[in-house]
Amino acid sequence: MSEHARLSPSASDRWLVCGAAPEREATVPDRASDAAAEGTAAHALAAHCLTHEISAVDAPSHPDWMRWDTADFRAHVETYLKFVRSKMNGNSHLFVEQTLQIFPLHGVWGTADAVIVEGHTMRIIDLKFGLGILVDADGNSQLNLYGWGGYDTLEWLASCPVEFVEVIIVQPRRDSIVSKTFTVDELKAWVAEVRPKVEAAYAGGAPAVPGEHCRWCRVRATCAERREFIQSSAAMVFADGCKPEVDTMNEAVIVQVFKHIPLIEQYLKDIETWVADQSHERGHALPGLKFVEGRATRTIVDEAGAAKALAELGIDAYAPAKLLGVGEITKQLRLVGWKFDDFLKPFVKMRVSPPILVAEEDKRQAYDPVAGAKEAFAS
C-alpha cells in the first residue's frame, strides 16, 4: 500500500467532480509545504499521546515533532486530545491511526486519527491542524468517505450492530469542531450514488470538469479545460449580448461581473505563481519574459548598535510599551489554560466590520441587520 491513496478522501471534493484530476496530478510532484509538515508533526504527537495515555505537555521530545515543538504547538494538540478523551468511557474501544478501507478496489483509503466504537455508535475523529481554511461539515465528501470507511472496516469488531456513524473534525487552531452523523442506510445510499464516479476517476480517461474545486489541484495553472472555463466565464460577462442599450451597464450585468471576480482573480494568481516557479527552477525567465531588478528595502540588522548610535543624538529608538494584540494574548492565555472571553471579556468591546457582499450561492448565512443590531445592544 502506498503512503498516500491514489484517490485521497481529502481531495474527494475535486475528483468526485473532475474525474481527470487524479490521473493528471500524478504527473506532477506534490511539493510538501511547511504547513503540511507541521500538520504531520501534530498528528505524530497526538498519536503518541493517545497510544501512551499521556498529555501533550508530558510527552517527550521526538524527531517527528521536534522542529515544531513549542508550548503553543503542544497546547493545540492537547485541545484535540481532551476532546477525544471526552468522548470515551469504560465501554469504549479506541483505535489510533486506523487505516480505513473505503473503496479498496479503486485506490480509496484513508487513515483515521482516532476511532471510538461504543454500543451502536462509531465515532471517527479527524485532527486538522491547518489555520487558513475553516472546514465545514455540510456537503463534505471527506466526512462521507471516512464514515463509510469506518463502518466498512471496523463494524465487525463492534460488540453490537453499529447503527450510527458520527464523523468529527477537530480544528484546534480555529477553535472549531464540526460533525456529521449518518445512519448506516444513509451511508450505503450515498456510496451507491458515488460509486460510478469513483470507478471513473480510478480507471482514467475521465473528462476534466473545471470549477471552484480547482483551487488545490496541482495542474490548475496548466489545465486547458480550466482556461476555457475561465475564458467562457469572462466572455459571458463581457459579451456583446450583455451590452445594454444605454451607455452604462444595468445592475444585473454588473452583479454578474462581480460574481466572477474571485474565480478570475484566483486563476490569474495561479498563472502568476506557476510562471514564477518555472522561471526560478530553470534559472532564466520563460521566453517572452525577463527578470528586472527587485524593489530595494532597508532593514536594520544590528538593532542594539543602531539604538546606541541614535541615543548619542538624544533619540529614543524604541517605541513606548504597547499591549499585545488580541491574537497573541489569546495564545498566551491558552498556554495557561484560559480562554480569552473567560478572562478579558469585561475589558473588551467587540467591533464588527461592515457586512461583506458575496454571491447569493455562498454558503454563509445572509446578514440580518435587525438581529445584528440586537446583538450589538446586548453586548
Image (cartoon, rainbow, N blue to C red):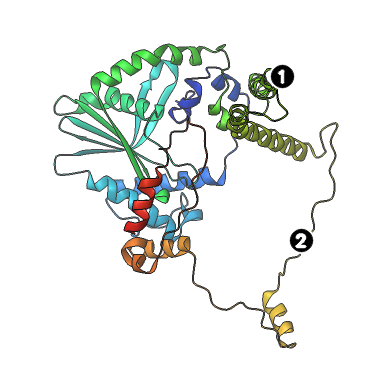
Instruction: Please determine whether, in this image, residue 20 is positioned above or below residue 70.
Output: above
Q: Residue at x 38, y 49 (%)?
A: 372
Q: Position of residue 114 (x, y in %)?
A: 31, 39
Task: Tell me the kind of residue under disc 2.
Answer: Thr
Which residue is painted at 45% across and 60% down in the image? Answer: 70
Using the image, tell me which numbered label, if any, was put on residue 297: 2
Mark 2 nearby-residue class (10 Å; few <14, some 14–19, many ≥20): few
Residue placed under numbered mark 1 in the picture: 240
Left or right side of 95 for 2? right
Describe residue 12's horizontal placement relative to residue 124 as left or right.
right
Position of the C terminus by quadrant: bottom left
Image quadrant containing the N terminus: top left
Task: Find residue 106 and report its horizontal and vertical position in percent.
Answer: 44, 16
Q: Nearer the viewer, residue 27 or 308?
A: 308
Task: Give the number of the mark in front: 2 or 1.
Answer: 1
Viewed as shown, does residue 173 lie left or right of 185?
Answer: right
Seen in the picture, residue 303 relative to 298 is either above or below; the reply is below
Observer able to see residue 52: no
Instruction: Write the residue at 66% across / 19% down.
Output: 232
Q: Quick one: label 1, few (<14), some, or many (20+) residues within 10 Å?
A: few
Q: Earlier in the sequence, mark 2 or mark 1?
A: 1
**Numbered marks: total:** 2
| 80 with respect to 302 (left or right) | left
Secondary element at tag 1: helix
- In percent of width and height, residue 367 lies at 42, 42
Residue 301 horizontal/vertical position (percent): 71, 69
Residue 341 makes an appearance in the image: yes
